[in-house]
Image (tube, grey):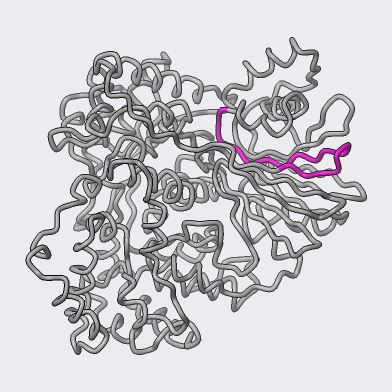
Amino acid sequence: MCGICGFNFADKVLLKKMCILIKHRGPDDDGYFIDDKVSLGMRRLSIIDLNTGNQPQHNENEDIWIVFNGEIYNFLELRADLEKRGHNFYTQSDTESIIHSYEEWGKECVNKLRGQFVFCIYDKRKEILFLARDHLGLKPLYYYFNGSDFIFSSEIKCIFPHGISREVNNNALNLLLSLKYAPFNETLFKGIYRLPSSTYMIFNLKSKHLVKKKYWTFNFKPDNNKNISLLVNELKNLIEESIKIRMISDVPLGAFLSGGIDSSGVVGIMSKLTENPIKTFSIGFEEGAPVNETKYARIVSDYFNTVHTELTVKSTSFKILPDLVWHFDDLIVDAAMIPIYFMAKYAKEKITVALTGDGADEVFAGYNWYFKPQKKYYTQYLPDSVFQNLMKFHRYYPSHKIRLLLSYINTMRQNYGSFYNSIFVIPDSEKSEVVNFRANDVLPQIRSRFFQDLDEVNQFINWDLNYQLPNQYNMKLDKMVMAASLEARVPYLDQKIVNWSTSIPSHLKFKDNIEKYILRLALKDVLPPEILRRKKRGFGTPIGFWLQKGLKEISAEILERLSKRKLLFKPKYIKLLKRNRSRELYMSKIWSLIMFELWYETFIENDGLKPVKI
């Protein structure tokens, strides 16, 4: 794993400043390529080919150069094929396989790669930069282009040494307040963009023209004719092979273990594939917290005889928040960042690569709100005309609780109501009370991407695979493990598994009120019964509990500072949150606004080159 950066002119001093800001992504080495047209830089975390794998790398003629972040799991197959086609290799690394794949197949090389990656190829002959992000968006890539200067990097803060103006992008802020992340290509910074997953872009160094293209999409075409026993065997083989190729490493390797079926399945198959005990790592929370699943992780550890380590995270851990916000320059307000970071930091003392169970919920339908989209509760008894009249006066009702209830009912009256309410923090109908800028409704932006010939379950899965995974969950994992200089590998998000999952009907993902039904069948002979029977529990963080303990006083202070952002937020709403800090109803909103204030202080009030202090 690495961090990469570059731009379309020569400046070694500036390039080194960029690389220093992502040293945590690659503490083992740095490398630079500079000519009169481009500057390319990287920081390396050595995983494969420790001796000759340094970057930037080049082809035989040294007219094609690359900086690369990620792992290509099929690089040995690619290498063998390319050598037969006459290509000569000078390293044993997976990086070089991308260069020769580009030589052989041009921009179509991305369809040959199996893994997690972002890279930039400099083609001297064509005078272009060719950049790409992997199929599932496991690694991040950001860019800035003002019509003349083109700058790219693995992290947004890496762009700041160029003197880029830092302004809040209100549209992205609006999305963040609704969803906890910005799902499309915009970031919270005006003019700085995120390259979408499964997308490449080409920058012409002569004409300074930039084009982007989606190279891969999810193809939902369920086949209802296959025998379920055959499908279960296919899935078992796919998962085992995906884990096997992700165990290739020249450095110590282990696994994150929550005790759920996803991570437990990964640990079980890893144990089957090696004679050495697997090193596993779990997170627990202090006594009194409502979330703690360490007992299930211990069951799995004992069952597979792993070398197991548990870490307890306490409410006093809030002191790390400024550091985590600095790492989340592309802000995500997901409290699970805290335990992931501590687990990664602790695991780094013993391993350099960790396999995880992430992604199985999105691929195999593991969330309960996928399965009750048409349930309208008591809303079906309220005539549309009556409710429309009630909503006309929504903002004038004196009780905020009544306004929240009406917002909830309004959403539940739609077919996708339970799904929307599960992912929204601040609903559209409440937004005018919160912000002082014009905020377009978020719900229609989501719904507009649902109109396709899919059943509702697969529509929700399609949304999560396209937007929630690459922009929230994958980035939460990537940025937190990279902050600890650790690599995470995600077997369930192998593109072969994802492709396969889109070919099976929804009722095999959820059946008889059992989520991830076919995955459970595939892992039946792997997992202990008490784990196999467990219902879905998210990787929760007791943020409400923490807001009553370690974060209680500091949350009031941070909200007070936020109330001064009058161009963005309405002070009356911030006062409402301050008064209701102890109420569960407001916890997610308080957390989102606390995180935004810390982000604002770090990157707008200050230079963003280091964390602030609380």
In the image: residue 331, left or right of residue 461? right
Q: Position of residue 383 (x, y in %)?
A: 11, 70
Q: Does the magenta stretch include residue 116?
A: yes
In the image: residue 73, left or right of residue 59? left
The quadrant where residue 508 appears: top left
Q: Looking at the image, which residue sits at the far top?
A: 84
Q: Position of residue 258 (x, y in %)?
A: 31, 39
Q: Looking at the image, which residue sits at the far front?
A: 385
In the image: residue 83, left or right of residue 236? right
Magenta residues span 114-130
Q: Where is residue 311 in the image (x, y as percent from the top left)?
A: 35, 46
Instruction: Look at the magenta stretch and give its main secondary structure.
Output: strand
In the image: residue 12, left or right of residue 442? right
The quadrant where residue 220 appears: top left
Q: Which of 282 and 215 is in front in this view?
A: 215
Q: How many marks?
A: 0
Q: Where is residue 99 in the image (x, y as percent from the top left)?
A: 75, 29
Name the residue at 82% across, 27% down: 59
| Res. 298 in view | no
Q: Is residue 245 above or below residue 556?
A: above
Q: Is residue 200 magenta?
A: no
Name the residue at 81% across, 49% down: 204
The quadrant where residue 526 appears: top left
| Res. 211 in view | yes
Q: Nearer the viewer, residue 342 or 64?
A: 64
Name the residue at 24% across, 14% down: 229
Quadrant of the rendering where the N terminus is positioned: top right
